[in-house]
Amino acid sequence: MLNKTALNLLPGLLWAMIILVLTGLPGNYFPQISSFWDWIAPDKMIHLFMFGSFTYLILWGLRSTYKDTTKRKRLILFTIVLGTVYGGVTEILQRELFVGRDGNIFDFLANTLGGIIGILLFHMQYRKKTSQFKNSLK
């Protein structure tokens, strides 16, 4: 039987599988990037969303551990590294394995930035929720 933390991580892990499927789709479904300025294209917003959601869901799954202030910095660092590595792996898989796909440094940067945004959003929501809870006790 899975423990509570493992069950809480399930949405993040399922989202990671969805990301893998989406990044493995043939490239002719997506517009091509021809210049540096095209990196701000809607494609990059999708990368921001996918990896922001991924890191948010991972931290959400680890939220019971996140309460421990001594472990919080390690969890944030772990999640940044996990999101960055997973973003890099998906780009390498696109370049080396997936048919009709091409790994892109700008996609990797969007993956990493999206992951950091997801962490920041989780942290802001967590702080807001805990401050509301503390205020309700007064």
Image (spheres, rainbow, N blue to C red):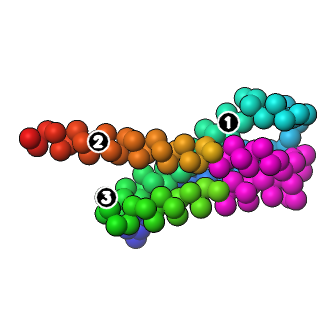
* Disc 1 from disc 3: Cα separation: 30 Å
Give the image location of residue 133, x and y in percent: 20, 43
The reply to whether residue 7 is visible in this rendering is no
Q: Which residues are magenta?
A: 85-112
**Given the image, on which type of amino acid does mark 1 rest?**
Ile
Q: Which mark is residue 129?
A: 2
For the residue labelled by badge 1, is the local secondary structure a helix, a strand or a loop? helix
For the residue labelled by badge 2, is the local secondary structure a helix, a strand or a loop? helix
In the image: residue 74, left or right of residue 26: left
Residue sitting at the far bottom: 1
**Mark nearer the N terminus (3 vs 2):** 3
Which of the 4 image quarters holds residue 136? top left
Indicate which label's residue lies in the foreground, 1 or 3. Answer: 3
**Given the image, on which type of amino acid does mark 3 rest?**
Lys
* Disc 3 from disc 2: Cα separation: 12 Å
Q: Is most of the magenta stretch helix, strand or loop? A: helix
Q: Which residue is mark 1?
A: 46
**Mark nearer the N terminus (1 vs 3):** 1
**Mark nearer the N terminus (1 vs 2):** 1
Q: Badge 1 local density, few (<14 within 10 Å), some, or many (20+)?
A: some
Give the image location of residue 15, x and y in percent: 58, 49
Residue 43 sits inside the magenta stretch: no
**If the image is split into quadrants, where does the C terminus sit?**
top left
In the image: residue 105, left or right of residue 11: right
Query: Does residue 72 lie above or below 42 as drawn?
Result: below
**Given the image, on which type of amino acid does mark 2 rest?**
Lys
Which residue is more in the foreground, 17 or 78? Answer: 78
